[in-house]
Image (cartoon, helix red, strand yellow):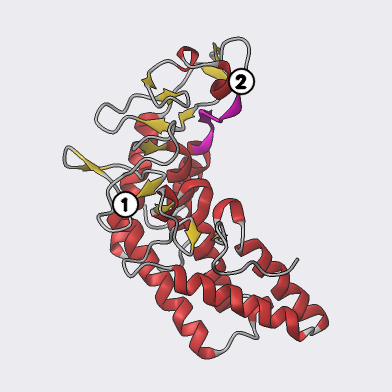
Amino acid sequence: KRPRSEKKKGSTGTFDNGATTAEIRVLARAFRINGEKRYQAAALKGLDHILKAQYSNGGWPQYYPLSTKYHRHITFNDGTMINLLELLRDVITDQDFEFVDPARRRAAADAIQRGHECIVECQMVVDGIPTVWCAQHHAATLAPVQARSYEHPSLSGAESAGIVRYLMSLDTPSPGAIRAVRAGVKWFDSAKIEGFRYRKSKSGPALSRDGNAAPLWARFYEIKTNRPIFSDRDGIICYDIDEIGSERRGGYTWYGNWGANVLKDYAEWPHR
């Protein structure tokens, strides 16, 4: 389609759910295979867009150009920031990106370092104890912030799992990253929920007792109490998933096995 006008309402690019990073990967692979220059040019434009979108503190918003709403905050939700960091790492190391010039490679390396520093700084400390991360953090203060009405400032079991696993994938993690992983893993071990099976459904109970079920982790935990929290679109916090309406109960993933791979990877991590 024709490019949107810069002045047209809604003309923002998103990094949510793998958007933009996935397209750049396809373009880079296509250029390596057939040498079509317009694919190379488009991939470089996308890379420049990502580098420009990064905040000076190392975080990325969900949208760029910036939204006036929650999308402007540093976004870990749905793997946004981790996807960007993984792409930049591949820009430096993967054969699909051999066409990237030295200046952009240096910019990517700098962006990665600042991104790692931002992750470490965003890790929430509760009563003096480092824990995990919120799905989004304030673009300036790094404090946990709300996104949609049912996505409260909280400790995120889903997004934090991706962050910890990414930090464990680093060849030479910084001392700060190592400390962040150790603290995150300790939190995951303490926050696991055993003896229940989860079923996302608009009818019937979401949790059922099952002594053979694998451990679960909630999507969101209250920061001070570490209790799982749930909400309808009205934003009222509930502590029992069956207290919210069927639309959100069955239309959102409130529990998952996210921590299982964190604990599995940590058992083999050389820096534990």
Q: Looking at the image, which residue sits at the far right? A: 34
What number of labels is visible? 2
Q: Residues within 10 Å of mark 2 (few under 14, many from 20)?
A: some
Nearer the camera: disc 1 or disc 2: 1
Q: Looking at the image, which residue sits at the far left? A: 128
Could you tell me if residue 173 is visible in this image? no
Callout 2: SS: loop
Q: Nearer the viewer, residue 224 or 232?
A: 232
Callout 1: SS: loop
Magenta segment range?
Answer: 251-258
Residue 110 figure quarter: bottom left
Q: Badge 1 is on which residue?
A: 138
Could you tell me if residue 198 is visible in this image? yes
Q: Badge 2 is on which residue?
A: 199
Q: Is residue 25 above or below residue 133?
A: below
Q: Nearer the viewer, residue 240 or 218?
A: 240
Residue 136 point in image, percent of width and height: 39, 47
Q: Residue at x 49, y 63 (%)?
A: 64
Residue 182: mark in rendering: none
Q: Can residue 256 be found in the magenta stretch?
A: yes
| Amino acid marked by disc 2 | Arg
